[in-house]
Amino acid sequence: MTPRTTARRTGVARTSGAGSSRASSPAPGTRPLPAVVLHGATVVDSPLLEDGSVDAVAVQVAPARPGDDELQPRTGTPQAAARYGIDLAELAERAGLTGAAGEAFTVHLPQPVGSSVVLPWAGMPPRIVLVGVGDEGGTSLRRAGAALARATRGLRRVATSVGAQTHHDAPAAAQAARAVVEGYLLASYTIPRIASSSDEKAPAELVLLGRDGPEVTAAVDAARTAAAATWLVRDLANTPSNVKDPAWMADRARRLAGRAGLEVEVLGPRELAAGGFGGILAVGGGSASSPRLVRVTYTPEGRAGRHVVVVGKGITYDTGGLSIKPREAMVPMKTDMAGAAVALATVLAAAEARVPHRVTAVLPLAENHVGAASYRPGDVLRLFGGTTVEVANTDAEGRLVLGDALAWADATLEPDVLVDVATLTGAATLGLGKQHAALYGTDDALVAGLVAAGERTGELAWHMPLVEEYDEAVRSSVADLRHVPVDRHIGGGSITAALFLRRFVGTRPWAHLDIAGPGRAPADKHEVTEGATGYGARLLLDWLSRLD
């Protein structure tokens, strides 16, 4: 029987930039992801393993069963062992592998000395990567894909059976392929370097052995869409703030939305003043870079389902204003606009995925700086719609720009659902650490849908209470609201921030994602990369794709 050797390349092929000279980093949203190829042949019969085009073969191992000491081989591993003539199980044991998701060990095969010596693997890829797949669930396979990306960085092409299924359940095989590809693409990300030269290692092209067909193709394309959204958030948030001011962010949003054929509206300082956006104007008043408000809307063909508005905090740099931050706390503040980047990436990905709902991103953009026109503790601001707010701390600027944007969205956009995303409070990080976002909401079904989406995508969210007894923390004797508590006996800083935002959403179903913890990472771990993580884009896209 003739082996299936047809291959399909999904997405845009990778272009190599390693070793090239450049004066600046690529514009966010323009960097191509690594190419992914579907290849119907397996480790047993694929001619790719003998034509010199593949640098490494990756196979999978799982933990030992209860009562058993031996690692469990999975589809492709015994076949690779037979084709190479190597006991891969013994090599895995010798390397100390446990089969846990995220493990990867590379076997570098020796080359012969002398023309008379012929090794069993002659002409085949000189590297075998043993990858742990854990329980083979979605999270484990995503981690396996991420480990594979890091183990093969700098190679040209890697072929793998990781995630391949032995049964003929097409949906399960497709979801397994999606998890592996998504993890691989997410972990392939590197922060763009702004340098005269770069020795950055490019990620390898990924060949999925033994996988083809329309369901797998669709799953891999969905993985690319989700990963591209995360790459965009990371690129935008990692861009230095001497490049990225509100005008720059507005221009990037306009360009990316225009390229996707979406509707764009940008309000500058004059329009913001005329519209009564007192929060955005106050926060941006101390900076030489004036604020903006951006709206990007995707409308599906035919009759749209719901109208979902995603509002993202867009503080392009946060000094804390007159309530100035310590130096150490300022270092990561170029990422304080991650919420706006998530909102933008979500609407672009929704358009690419053709979700059946109308989706609008609202980006309130400002730089919280120190200057002669800085707003002050004790000031009373009038936000959009007329609500007055007493300022107690200029380093709590995010809720002011969000208040303006949420009130505007509620009054003018007629959303069916309002969601906001923000790196808002240190309190959320103290309470939940770096793995979970703090999730608040006024609608049980909305909250449950977002939590479930986080479980599926690995972007975890923890449902937090809107404690009514804490509402006194946002009361003011001189204005309608005080934006942060003065009396510290209440605590619950993330909760009181959510209670403040709730005042601006009217009666709409609303959810608030405080991503201060998972929005940034000090180091690479699994599919998460150092710096801006891009948290939230995949969660929201998954939720939108399943929304009734």
Image (spheres, rainbow, N blue to C red):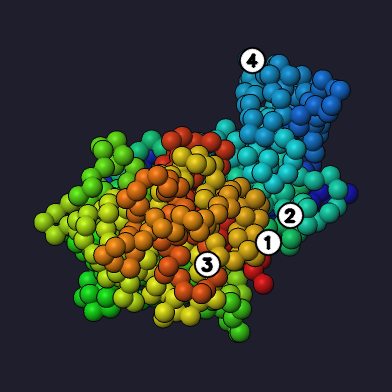
Residue under pointer 2 = 174
Of helix, strand and loop, which one carries label 4?
A: loop
Residue 95 screen position, x and y as percent:
67, 19
Badge 1 vs badge 2, beta-carbon distance below 8 Å:
yes
Q: State which quadrant residue 306 falls in.
A: bottom right
Residue 327 screen position, x and y as percent:
25, 37
Nearer-N-terminus badge (3/1): 1
Nearer-N-terminus badge (4/3): 4
Q: Which label was assigned to residue 218? A: 1
Q: Residue furthest right?
A: 1
For the residues marked 2 and 3, what is the alpha-carbon distance in whole angstroms?
33 Å
Residue under pointer 3 = 510
- Disc 1 residue type (three-letter): Ala
For the residues marked 4 and 3, what is the alpha-carbon distance in whole angstroms?
71 Å
Give the class, few, some or many, for how many residues have Cα within 10 Å of label 3's Cα (few <14, many ≥20).
Answer: many
User: Measuring 35% from the left and 38% from the top, which residue is drawn there?
Assistant: 198
Of helix, strand and loop, which one carries label 1?
A: helix
Q: Name the front one of labels 4 and 1.
A: 1
- Disc 2 residue type (three-letter): Ala
Residue 296 appears in the rendering: no
Give the class, few, some or many, for how many residues have Cα within 10 Å of label 2's Cα (few <14, many ≥20).
Answer: many
User: Measuring 63% from the left and 15% from the top, which residue is drawn there?
Assistant: 113
For the residues marked 2 and 4, what is the alpha-carbon distance in whole angstroms?
45 Å
- Disc 3 residue type (three-letter): Trp
- Disc 4 residue type (three-letter): Gly
Q: Residue furthest bottom?
A: 302
Q: State which quadrant residue 217 falls in.
A: bottom right
